[in-house]
Image (tube, rainbow, N blue to C red):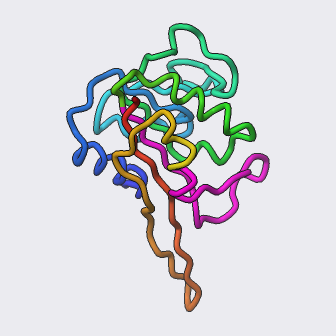
Amino acid sequence: MQTIITKFVEDVFKEHGGFTTPIVDVGGAETQGQFKHLFSYEIWDKRNLPDVDRVIDITEPLERSAINYAAVLICVDTLEHIWEFQKAIKNLGRIVKQGGVLVITVPFAFPFHDISSDFWRFSSLALDRLFLEDFARLDSGFYGEDIRIGSWGAAHTNSFFIGRRR
């Protein structure tokens, strides 16, 4: 079954296409290769799990080999779990090659989850402010779906930012 996130990333690749490799998914250990049917990519995560290609703490100084590495960096629903998100944002920018593309999604209107580390919610305006120093915006905004349970309804909405490294 295709998740709304997988569909979003697929749409990004169709719309902005022509991406080169390497493509890196930072924080994607739990997704178990959800984009493998779309393209070949590496998973970088702080957890040493079976699908992880490189163990990395995105808030710590980067290894030299990680700097200017990725032609495309995907970071899906990860930033809200990082207490020191400013350090993570700086390092995400350092991983992307000049002219490379960054695709970030984060929950906005979404239930509290992962009780140990669900710290933040970012609007698309916040993502713009956080990433525009190093990236030219290609697109930003919101995507999601309405969930209805009886008469109660809630929007599950994510913010996103897509930018090209200056």
Q: Is residue 33 left or right of residue 155?
A: left
Q: Please name whichever residue, 41 or 133, is drawn nearer the observer in this view of the structure.
A: 133
Q: Quadrant of residue 164?
A: top left
Q: Position of residue 39 (x, y in %)?
A: 29, 32
Q: Position of residue 60 (x, y in %)?
A: 69, 21
Magenta segment includes 33 = no
- Image quadrant holding the C terminus, namely top left
Say above or below: 86 vs 117. above
Q: Position of residue 135 (x, y in %)?
A: 44, 36
Q: Position of residue 120 (x, y in %)?
A: 69, 53
User: Quick one: which residue is furthest to the bottom in this view?
Assistant: 151
Say above or below: 158 vs 39. below
User: Quick one: which residue is furthest to the top in this view?
Assistant: 64
The residue located at (70%, 61%) in the rendering is 112
Q: Is residue 111 left or right of residue 93?
A: right
Q: Number of callouts in the render?
A: 0
The residue located at (63%, 32%) in the rendering is 88
The residue located at (54%, 30%) in the rendering is 92
User: Quick one: which residue is furthest to the right in this view?
Assistant: 116
The residue located at (69%, 57%) in the rendering is 113
- Image quadrant holding the N terminus, namely bottom left
Q: Quadrant of residue 33?
A: top left
Q: Please name whichever residue, 126 or 88, is drawn nearer the observer in this view of the structure.
A: 126
Give the magenta range.
Answer: 101-127
Q: Please name whichever residue, 39 or 136, is drawn nearer the observer in this view of the structure.
A: 136
Q: Quadrant of residue 74?
A: top left
Say above or below: 18 vs 61. below
